Amino acid sequence: MSDENDMDGEDIKRDDPMLAAEFSLGLLEGEELLAARGKLASDPDFAWRKEWWDNWFAPWTDEISGAEPSADVWGEIEARVLAASGQEASGLDAANVVELQSKVRRWQWVSALTTAAAVAALALVVVPAGTETIPTPGATEAPQIAAADPLVAQVPIGDTGLRLDVTYMPESERMLVGAIGLTADGVHDHELWLVPADGSALQSLGVVTPGEVRSVTLPAEITQNMGSGVELVLTREPIGGKPVDQDAGPVVAQGAFTQV
Amino acid sequence: MADGPTPASAEAREALKAAMARLADGDRSALEDIYRATRVKLFGICLRILGDRKEAEDALQDVYVNLWQRADRYDPTRASPISWLATFARNRAIDRLRTGKVRGGAVPVEEAAPLPDQAPLADSLLVDAEQTAQIHTCLEGLDENARGHIRAAFFDGKTYAELAETADVPLGTMKSWIRRGLQRLRACLEASE
């Protein structure tokens, strides 16, 4: 090493291509990893650069010795694929119906907000996994929400045609999360996160319950970050949500609030 | 290392490309062809990162199930199938490390390490001889320290924090070493394009 003085790690400009390299190598963890994953989905230039690094690093895998997996691995893959295909086939048949239903449902929410309290009363109460969550830095300029206009967000799940419908009502500080049409795989839960517009840490909005509409009252530290254009990400976690002492899982879907 | 692909491997690559196209069209039988052709290489990658057969087999399952579910994600204009699959498998294995399914220390590094980085098995596909030569040339241009740590990140799935701890240096120092290396690496690779 020639320059022993440059020891703060910040002497090298950490531009997007650098971040993409770190991401590609797998150096990132925690919030940085989550942020990079979010960026991958929303920033085509970054996604391109990540793939550029991936392609350059890929030949390195030729140095890794191959190994033969157990003979039963293929059978398990096949069983899982068959099970998934069965679900998919019925899902496809109903795709249009699902689409229509969720549209209707969304408009019902938007147009019938006065009944939201009733809906909320029927729904189970979600305990935001979030009491432990990622610490929030001091509030900066939170997006302003005009009066009591609700915010809605759709979070499409891959290309399954399914999505989460999230509605937030500033007046009551309640959020409804609808995951109708989704089914639990018994191995994972999915956790919803708010991505504050000021670049601060993601905030947990709790674990999503497949097949239900749930209602939750949000604490002030989360509501202050609510606003039109604010993004949501959905991560895949072990059952029960992100363990306290571990990093969040991979981002599997994302969306953004719009005011209606 | 820089030998051109043999006719046999060129044939294997074409067969794999065709199978990937069939898979994207929803042909389930293509998945088995892809599995037969790539399992040795991809399992080797998972095993190297995770250091545990059971975990690596679970990761391998995820790789192929995911591949089936999202075969459309592969873009043949950006990467060769084996390059993309190798990256995909490595990412899945690292996901498992990071999400805590495998505790970072569940398998001591010493236990994971004995897998020798020797010649790949004959039936595992190589990524790309020309690209391999280029990245090795560029890596030679890095100082040994940066090169070693970048390699450890790639082959062992180490984070900055883990690398700093292993090397017993402050986190910032490790970041400096690696970022300086990556900056040079990028310049060299871009110059070669």
Image (cartoon, coloured by chain):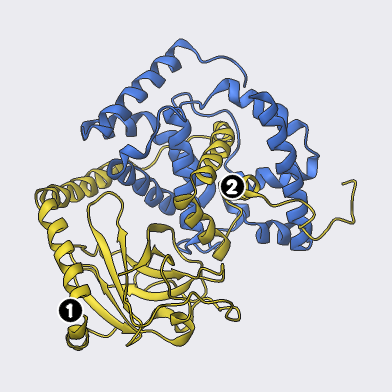
Chain colours: A yellow, B blue
Between residue B60 and residue A19, name the one nearer to us: A19
Q: Secondary structure at mark 1?
A: loop
Q: Is residue A247 left or right of residue A234?
A: right
Q: Amino acid at mark 1?
A: Ala
Q: Are marks 2 and 1 in contact (CB under 8 Å)?
A: no
Query: In the rendering, at what x and y percent does residue A28 appear?
Result: 59, 57
Query: In the rendering, at what x and y percent does residue A57 appear?
Result: 58, 36
Q: Amino acid at mark 2?
A: Ala
Give above or below for A103 relative to A131.
Answer: above
Residue found 60% across the figure and 36% down from its top:
B117
| Circle number at residue A112 | 1
Please tell me which of labels 2 and 1 falls first in the chain.
Answer: 2
Between residue A224 and residue B112, name the one nearer to us: A224
Q: Secondary structure at mark 2?
A: helix
Q: Is residue A8 left or right of residue A24?
A: right
Residue found 62% across the figure and 48% down from its top:
A16
| Circle number at residue B121 | none
| Circle number at residue A20 | 2
Give above or below for A151 relative to A182.
Answer: below
Q: Is residue B186 left or right of residue B47?
A: right
Query: In the rendering, at what x and y percent does residue B136 appear?
Result: 68, 29
Q: What is the chain identity of the residue bearing mark 2?
A: A
Give above or below for A258 relative to A146.
Answer: above
Residue lying furthest front: A146
Residue found 15% across the figure and 52% down from its top:
A87
Number of the front mark, 2 or 1? 1
Give above or below for A166 relative to B135.
Answer: below
Report the Cα–Cα distance between label 2 and label 1.
44 Å
- The image quadrant where one finds the C terminus of chain B is top right
